Amino acid sequence: MNTEQQHRERALTDRVLASFDETGDERLRHLMHGLVEHLHDYIREVRLTEQEWHSAIEFLTAVGHVTDDRRQEFILLSDVLGASMQVVTVNNEAVSDATEATVFGPFFIEGSPQVPLGGDTSGGASGQPCWIEGQITDTEGNPVPHARIEVWQADNDGFYDVQLDQDVTTGRAHLFADELGHYSFWALTPTPYPIPHDGPVGRLLEAVGRSPMRASHLHFMVTAEGKRTLVTHIFVHGDELLPHDSVFGVRDSLIKEFAAQAADTPPPGGRDLAGQPWARARFDITLAPAQAP
Ligand code: BEZ
Ligand code: FE
């Protein structure tokens, strides 16, 4: 490219950057500068054509059109671009061996039922019963007493309760760890499911040959006094989708052994499983301090 062309392109970026000079809010100015700098770099680097820019605007318009109170296609777009996961990563700085965070996802709702320690969080959703247990400690190894643990998951058909037509609460609950941080509950062995892919984000995935499937997982949110809130999942060791999770949520440290148990293995707590096989997994959780050093 000739130097006159280079000069014109750089001069335009500089003019746009200067247009934010009077922004009173310093953080906003910083954010707008970064956005313009990177956006212009992108346009120049890929030599974006006018037709491509037009298609991009059309795509974003379609994303807006399918977004409403129940369907948030912009978040889905952020998820499949790895932007949601990068925001999580930036905002949950690595603190010694604190348990890693991952994406929140769109299916958490407030007001889940409480179950006792050892209780059943499935609410009757279909799937293989799975016993989950662990201990919650701080980064010094001290037990964290009475943490609140929220769990939510899809049923065996890959649906969260909020995606069903019926008004039911299944596959979600909360419980409190005991005074030594021990917790246990029944859930379902997680199974894979696709993110909503009948809209523009699904068409984008198809165009680039990517699958909408999420690796099998169980969501956790753990809150405790003086500790950083942990939003995470556990994943199933051996799941072939682990390297292909459509929203890049998998962390190696969150992959757990879900050990298959034969039907004649007595389940914990004397639960009557009507002779069906079950599974068990252990997830010890380390919470970072609320104000990471
Ligand atoms: C989920 O975990 O359920 C989820 C996360 C991101 C996008 C869609 C679904
Ligand atoms: Fe999920």
Image (tube, rainbow, N blue to C red):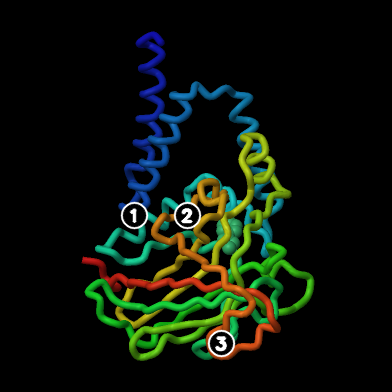
The residue that label 2 is drawn on is 250
Q: Residue furthest front?
A: 264
Is 189 positioned to the left or the right of 224 in the image? right
Q: Position of residue 10 (x, y in %)?
A: 37, 23
The Cα atoms of the two marked residues, 2 and 3, are separated by 27 Å
Q: Which residue type does callout 2 highlight?
A: Val
Q: Which residue is mark 1?
A: 25
Q: Nearer the viewer, mark 2 or mark 3?
A: 3
Label 3 vs 1, first from the N-terminus: 1
Question: How far apart in space, not on screen, are marks 2 and 1 (Cα)?
Answer: 36 Å
Q: Earlier in the sequence, mark 2 or mark 3?
A: 3
What is the tally of numbered marks visible in this picture? 3
Residue at the spot 52% in from the left edge and 68% down from the top edge = 259
Pointer 3: what residue?
119
The CB of the residue at mark 2 lies under 8 Å from ligand 1: no
The mark that comes first in sequence, 2 or 1, is 1
Residue drawn at point x = 62 percent, y = 35 percent: 208
> Where is residue 167 shown, x and y percent of the image?
75, 78
Residue type pointed to by label 1: Asp
